[in-house]
Amino acid sequence: MSILVDKNTRLVVQGITGSAGAFHTRQCMEYGTNVVAGVTPGKGGQMFDGKVPVFDTVWEARQKTSCNASMVFVPAPAAADSILEAVDAGVDLVVCITEGIPAMDMMRVKALMRGKKSRLIGPNCPGIITPGACKIGIMPGYIHKPGGIGVISRSGTLTYEAVWQLTSRGYGQSTCIGIGGDPIHGLSHLDVVKLFNEDPATNAMVLIGEIGGSAEEEAAAWIKANYKKPVAAFVAGMTAPPGRRMGHAGAIVSGGKGTAAGKIEALRGAGIAIAETPATIANTLIAQLEARS
Amino acid sequence: MNIHEYQAKELLQKFDVATTHGKVAATVDEAEQIARELGAVDVVVKAQIHAGGRGKGTFKNGFKGGVHVRKTPEEVREVASKMLGQILVTHQTGSAGRMVNKVLVAESAEIAREIYFAVLLDRATAAPLIVASTEGGVEIETVAAKSPEKIIREAVDPLAGLQPFQTRKLAKQLAFESSQLKSASKLFERLYHTFIAFDCSMVEVNPLVVTMKGEALALDAKFNFDDNALYRHPEIAALRDIAEEDPREVEASKRGLSYIGLDGNIACLVNGAGLAMATMDIIKFYGGEPANFLDVGGGATEEQVTDAFKILIADKKVKAILVNIFGGIMKCDVIAQGIINAAKTVKLSEPLVVRLEGTNVERGKQLLKESGLALIAADDLADAAQKAVAAAATVNSKSQSPSSK
């Protein structure tokens, strides 16, 4: 078991013929992801690598291949439209890797997705992986290992760091999700925490936060009231100066809000074990697990 | 991206947002001419730099204050002559101060009361939000802390946009009289349109003033633009004043790198914003001070990595360099080749700690080994940070006491 993606996931890749799209589609296929279709407007009828049919629209891809998840690699100016196209076609999960999408485009996407069954991960995210079953995104597959730890984070490489620490110590993952660093995005920390809570295969969780916004605080409040599995957390940006945007559009401390210290306090208040440095994320969780057993 | 006050005024004028009349001057002749055209009784002259606290600042020539009110064009000329080409120091500029190349010359409004009005993109609701208060002219955070009941919030539907009734409600909540309702509503509506039209993350008007005659005017506007949307607003991108920015950051952004200069002595080169922040944190944890935030991004080329190195070592404070790469999209061999190229083209005298993990890690390590570069290899993040801190400390003690060699 896992959350959102597994062996039954049938993936369509939007922007499959672009260089990044093609490269990562191959990586996902090598990992074992069932890529059933690609979409590039104007290139319908082609075959990608002789194996994957390319369609002009997601609507057609959905009809012909019953794809139920999408990975979006379309360049930023057209990416919001591509997300909406997948939602309109009835795809269950849309994973948008593209970075640099204007916030107002994402604002409209969120508003138009209200009431729809599709879920969105990203944009500006590494994607989602259920180790050994399905990889939708740009994370290196080999650092993962099937197991029972759920991992949730905003950023890519910091998530790899945490996953690699877990794998190196023999702890596998149920599903790992990078929800993305943009201020307006799809699934939130809290949404994913709830999914992990309901997943019987997830027995513990690593939550990685970053400065900016209040998503970590919201997740902390919910965890305090509802979540019973062990959780370890790390928050990046302790040393980030206020008012400066740290790469991610979301990573900014402004008006005294969204500080690492505030987030750590909220998480600690919810009974979550805090990793003091990014090098001790796995050990912090393992200590929790050992203390319980 | 930040813009000058006069540029903000021009944007407001473009959208017919009511504001005071005024123009920017780069010379004393222009300043005098604008004052003459305004013909107003009182004219305000304001030094144009990005930093705040101008009114209370002091010029390096001894002239006090970057904001002055004068009555005649001759007086305006005289005050402009003391500002233009001079360096203004405020609590936000640091002791170096900023060169004043332009002054804004505008009519001085007769203010009856000051209001706070802002439109922002609220990340929690993923929708525009108007935040306003009758307590304008002061820090809104102070108002929010002392009298939260005086903060008005009006959520806007992202698809339908700001509705006319909402602007009337806002006007009432902000204590406008019935006779002023129409002009206030119009002002709010136009500010909202400006916010949408330029893909802003925030437009803050503080103060929005009501004059003695009952007019509502946006006196000063602060725009925050969404960098991701600048590609569709070339007219906004053109307003960037690189003289106001850290030259290292300007250089980095030209090369597609995300760099922020800090005060420490351990330079960092990392891929990914989250890991870059975490690397800064762990350096601090082990007693060091990061010299910068540098995210080479997901798809950096060898050239970008080489450029990144050049920017890092241009910072004279740097005593050690820490490279921390967890390859995903970014391949470790590309980073390794970039490091090798950089070492060839620039003299690398500082200790270099390298930690590589992820895609093509073995090839990357092999390349570095074969290059014969003198570097300190690290096994993991903690090891890397400790080695970098130790290396910087060694260099420090050497440079402080050369006789002990």
Image (cartoon, coloured by chain):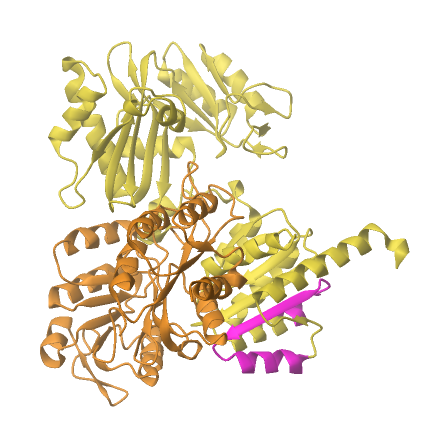
Chain colours: A orange, B yellow
Work out whether residue B233 or residue A180 is closer to the camera in this orientation and state it.
A180
From the top left corner, tell me how far across and down residue B255 is, in percent: 50, 60
Outermost residue on the right side: it is B403
From the top left corner, tell me how far across and down residue A34 is, in percent: 24, 82
Q: Which residues are magenta?
A: B342-371
Q: Determine the residue positioned at 82% across, 50% down.
A: B400
Q: Is A2 above or below relative to A29?
A: above
Q: Is B129 above or below relative to A78?
A: above
Q: Determine the residue positioned at 49% across, 59% down.
A: B257
From the top left corner, tell me how far across and down residue B355 is, in percent: 59, 70
Outermost residue on the front side: it is A293
From the top left corner, tell me how far across and down residue A83 is, in percent: 21, 63
Query: Which quarter of the image is occupied by the C terminus of chain B?
Result: bottom right
Q: Does B401 sit left or right of A228 as displayed?
A: right
Work out whether residue B236 or residue B151 is closer to the camera in this orientation and state it.
B151
Q: Does A128 sit left or right of B398 as displayed?
A: left
Residue A78 in sight in this render: no
Query: Is B33 in the magenta?
Result: no
Q: Determine the residue positioned at 30% across, 46% down.
A: B123
Q: Determine the residue positioned at 24% across, 40% down.
A: B128
Residue B46 in sight in this render: yes
Outermost residue on the left side: it is A63
